[in-house]
Image (cartoon, grey):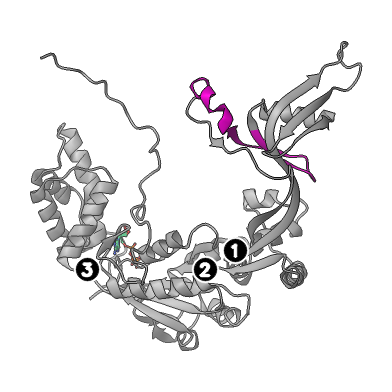
Amino acid sequence: MTELKLSETRDLTRIERVGAHSHIRGLGLDSSLEPRAVSEGMVGQVSARKAAGVILQMIKDGKIAGRAVLLAGQPGTGKTAIAMGMAKSLGLETPFAMIAGSELFSLEMSKTEALTQAFRKAIGVRIKEETEVIEGEVVEVQIDRPAVAGAAAKTGKLTLKSTEMETVYDLGAKMIEAIGKEKVTSGDVIAIDKASGKITKLGRSFSRSRDFDAMGPQVKFVQCPDGELQKRKEVVHCVTLHEIDVINSRTQGFLALFTGDTGEIRAEVREQIDTKVAEWKEEGKAEIVPGVLFIDEVHMLDIECFSFLNRALENEMSPILVVATNRGITTIRGTNYKSPHGIPIDLLDRLLIISTQPYTEDEIRKILDIRCQEEDVDMSEGAKHLLTKIGVETSLRYAIHLITAAALACQKRKGKTVELDDINRVYNLFLDVKRSTQYLMEYQSQYMFSETGEVDEDDTNAMVQ
Ligand SMILES: Nc1ncnc2c1ncn2[C@@H]1O[C@H](COP(=O)(O)OP(=O)(O)OP(=O)(O)O)[C@@H](O)[C@H]1O
Ligand SMILES: [Mg+2]
């Protein structure tokens, strides 16, 4: 038998980078909100996921405003992961805005302005518009070019048909240009927006499917539209309140959305927009879609921000607020008072608290498994076992980081599967926190600024056992 040699092909479509949470695709709940043990990249943390699922349902119903949830737990127990899971399962229609507590202090605007913008990024407005469109299959495009170039404007005719009728339309110069640009030919099914004259190609008519060979696979086939050629169509746009603010507040309008240079938005502008949106809502033209604002590392906010949050939550146009922290009892930023999670009691009282638990050995193993798949790393059973042990002894994050490093070590020795030795090697190359601290204790005197034995209080307050 002759051996067939297949040329190696490489998949070029997967060029996205693998991030810390790229394996999370949802919360992994079934239809009755019960968490599946391992699903959508999520492992364990059952009660927290279930609670998050209930919140999600609340958001989807869209009736409740101004609820707030706190995800509290030790570092690396999946708080951010759960929030990402919530964002993924909400879908594209519901806005999900995400900021880190520390971001507020590095923006070129006041903290409350930054918070207001974040709140308004989390509220969607679904605007309904009725437009008249002409939709049909192109029977013929006929464009008359004048004999002498530039002597007269081009004229032309476009014949469209539906299953029931056929009409010939006269074309102006602008339409001819649009048709040329979209490369409309007979057999295409197109829609023309009557107000703007915009032409959209919907696909090729099924009656032309025998031309398939000549078209290539990327062509979409659609039915020839039925009924009248002219139709009223409802189009729905989804924007956030923040986008409406930006477009109306600046001379450069929507361009500010791309540069991100929105600056402070005046209160009057916001008031006008709120009234307008309320009007649209009355008239049935618009619908408010409250989304989610997720503030990670919420202990980085200071007392002013916290009291702003108290008030903002009571607004009826408020999104669901999800905050996360890994701090225990610590000082509230901007004061000398201590409080659980570094959050003032009055705000804590308004929060539903979801706590995340440390993972068991089995769960760590499953998370590592998922990460190996996500990073396309082949790992032997023994190596996985050792890595799980490392994860239990040190931290989940450290173990996750070792996957990439071990894969590189394996590549270096031209291996295909990561073995025990590779893990051993990178374990000795990169220190985890415990070993690094130990090393520091031993050689402390040789470092700079290390005369005092005191450690900054804020840093030791993370919820570490
Ligand atoms: N239940 C889980 N299922 C799958 N992956 C998880 C799970 N929990 C955590 N991870 C992964 O473990 C890593 C650490 O989790 P994450 O960043 O969510 O921790 P955290 O609670 O936000 O920690 P911190 O308090 O330090 O911010 C991430 O890569 C995350 O995707
Ligand atoms: Mg986090």
Give the camera-side residue of 381 and 447. Answer: 381
Numbered tag placed on residue 444 in the rendering: none
Label count reads 3
Q: Which residues are magenta?
A: 189-215
Q: Residue at x 38, y 38 (%)?
A: 14
Amino acid bearing label 1? Lys
Estimate the spatial distance between the alpha carbons at disc 1 and disc 2, rounded to whole Å. 8 Å
Q: Which residue is mark 1?
A: 121
Q: Earlier in the sequence, mark 1 or mark 3?
A: 1
Screen quadrant of the N terminus: top left
Location of ligand 1 given as a quarter of the image: bottom left
Percent coordinates x, y for residue 436 in the rendering? 21, 59
Within 8 Å of ligand 2, the CB of disc 1?
A: no
Residue 145, placed above or below residue 221: above
Numbered tag placed on residue 293 in the rendering: 2
**Could you tell me which secondary element the residue under label 1 belongs to?**
helix
Amino acid bearing label 3? Tyr
Within 8 Å of ligand 1, the CB of disc 3?
A: yes
Give the camera-side residue of 139 and 69. Answer: 139
Residue 94 lies in the magenta-colored region: no
**Could you tell me which secondary element the residue under label 2 belongs to?**
strand
